């Protein structure tokens, strides 16, 4: 993926491209190597809970991404939990959009540590 070698692109929007789980895994792999992307919008891409988990693993180590948009991706409570745990290790993400992902009030509670340190999270 070209994103792995990119040294100039800071923002990428792939709204409604139906990337699914495989696309989410590809982005996670690219983000491991990319050091310039600060904003990624993957709204409406059907990544599901497993795709969220793949992104969460890389968020634990990524130190450049500040904004991640995952609106309407069928992430659910399982994917939300993985992202919340990743945010406990990530200190650069400041904005996360998880709107319309079937995350109830119980699921939202697991993000309290991230919210307390100033991460803006939309449910």
Image (tube, rainbow, N blue to C red):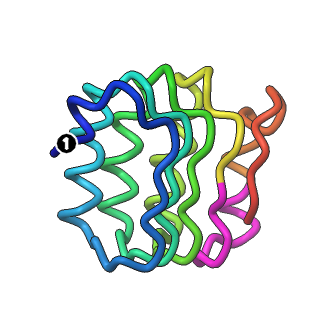
Quarter of the figure with residue 59 = top left
Q: Residues within 10 Å of mark 1 (few under 14, many from 20)?
A: few
Look at the picture and state if 18 lies above or below 67.
below
Answer with left or right where residue 96 lies relative to residue 123.
left
Residue at 48% in and 72% down: 15
Residue 2 among those drawn in magenta: no
Residue at 61% in and 24% down: 92
Quadrant containing the C terminus in the rendered view:
bottom right
Counting from the top left corner in percent of width and height, residue 79 is at 45, 59
Look at the picture and state if 105 lies above or below 63.
below
The outermost residue toward the front is 8
Counting from the top left corner in percent of width and height, residue 23 is at 23, 62
Counting from the top left corner in percent of width and height, residue 104 is at 69, 72
Look at the picture and state if 96 lies above or below 76.
above
Nearest the camera: 22 or 88?
22
Nearest the camera: 65 or 8?
8
Nearest the camera: 67 or 82?
67
Residue at 43% in and 37% down: 9
Answer with left or right where residue 85 lies relative to residue 62.
right
List the residue tagged with mark 1: 2
Look at the picture and state if 100 lies above or below 87.
below
Answer with left or right where residue 69 lies relative to residue 45.
right
Instruction: Please tell me how many numbered marks the rendered image carries.
Output: 1
Q: Which residues are magenta?
A: 97-108
Quadrant containing the N terminus in the rendered view:
top left
Describe the element under mark 1 as helix, strand or loop.
helix
Quarter of the figure with residue 94 = top right
Residue at 82% in and 31% down: 118
């Amino acid at each position: 993926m070209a994103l792995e070698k990119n040294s100039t692109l800071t923002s990428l929007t792939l709204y409604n491209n139906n990337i699914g789980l495989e696309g989410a895994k590809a982005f996670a792999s690219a983000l491991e190597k990319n050091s310039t992307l600060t904003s990624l919008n993957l709204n409406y891409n059907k990544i599901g809970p497993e795709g969220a988990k793949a992104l969460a693993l890389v968020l634990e180590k990524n130190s450049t991404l500040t904004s991640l948009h995952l609106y309407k991706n069928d992430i659910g409570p399982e994917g939300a939990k993985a992202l919340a745990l990743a945010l406990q290790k990530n200190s650069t993400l400041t904005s996360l959009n998880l709107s319309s992902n079937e995350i109830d009030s119980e699921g939202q509670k697991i993000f309290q540590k991230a919210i307390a340190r100033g991460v803006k999270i939309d449910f």
